[in-house]
Image (cartoon, grey):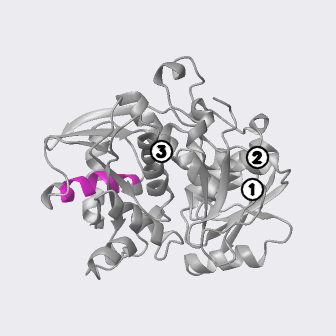
Amino acid sequence: MSAKTPFRVVCSACGREYEPESLAWKCECGAPLDVELDLEHASFELEALRNRVSSMWRYIELIPLLDSECVVSMGEGYTPMLSKRLGGVEVCLKLDYVNPTGSFKDRGASAMISNLKALGVREVAVDSSGNAGAAIAAYSAAAGMRCRVFVPASAPLGKKIQIASYGAKLVEVKGSRERVHEAVLRELGGAVYASHMWNPFFIEGLKTLAYEYVEQVEECPDAALLPVGSGGLLLGVYKGFRELRELGVTSTVPRILAVQAAGFTPVYEALHGPYRARASSPPLADGIAIPRPPRLTQIIEAVRESGGDAVVVEDHEILEAFRELARMGLFVEPTSATALAALWKALDQELVDRGETVYI
């Protein structure tokens, strides 16, 4: 199995194909781009993984790379998983906050920046409300690239400090998340737009969360509860499980349950119609406060194809889940706590059955 499994870059809507070396961040039709691996030239053998590096790059054959000599890694991935029996459900909690910058976004940043490094990119720019900006700033620094991160002026101070600490230029923009996106494109200059929402290689890093589950547990969960803002986490995890099924490693994929915070419910509304509650200001789960994710169509398709659904949680439920996780010894961001808050609702709504295994 070669470290460079063949792949192609295609439009998620019209199917137009782009050169893998292209720096296009979206299709001419306006839709996001995807990476498609030639899985006939790949495999996933648990025994072959035993003595590999303890990071997501242990799955290097399944991560699309332009040049395997340009991998930018700080040990991200292959994080611990904690199993708890909660409400009659076997819950597998993935502790991705132990990643270098504190979130799962490090996986996507590593894959994306590695490929941009292979193309000789010297400067990147991105819009983010927090964790993605921190991850991209850190991995850009590790790759020797200049980085500008455009953030909402209302973004948490701690996130701004973290981003700036990596040497990135922090650009604060007043107004909505959409205005931040418009600002980065307007002021891009000679930088490459390295978006966690749009760049297809970012999702390729996130799918390693599915690989790790199967390697660590040796089976597929019944359901996965995944917080959804831009949707990269959901799409990456679903893609990873789907690839493992195609490779014959598993026979099923989990039901994908999209977790959204009240006031930011595009997935729920596409499936069920308007949600009654409004967002708090500022929202407690600010990491998923995205009203119109660019990959919404793909998110809805993934939820439906998997037999899943969407669950909306409100601030008081998030806060209680945050406290419950703290009582377990886990200190997480409120956005991460939405997954546990959604578990209780999913049980009440019979989206998850007692006795099942759930990945969060």
Q: Position of residue 174 (x, y in %)?
A: 62, 79
The residue depicted at 42 percent of the width and 45 percent of the height is 241
Residue that carries the numbered disc 1 in the rendered image? 168
Give the position of the N terminus as an image quadrant. Answer: top right
Mark 1 is on which residue type? Answer: Ala
Tell me the amino acid under the disc marked 3: Glu
| Residue 166 appears in the figure | no
Figure check: 261 above or below 221: below
The image quarter containing residue 107 is top right
Dot placed on the residue nearer the N-terminal end, 3 or 1: 1
Mark 1 or 2, nearer chain start: 2
Give the magenta part as a residue range: 336-346
Residue identified by numbered label 3: 243
What secondary structure is marked by label 2?
A: helix
Mark 2, residue position: 141
Contact between marks 1 and 2 (CB within 8 A): the answer is yes
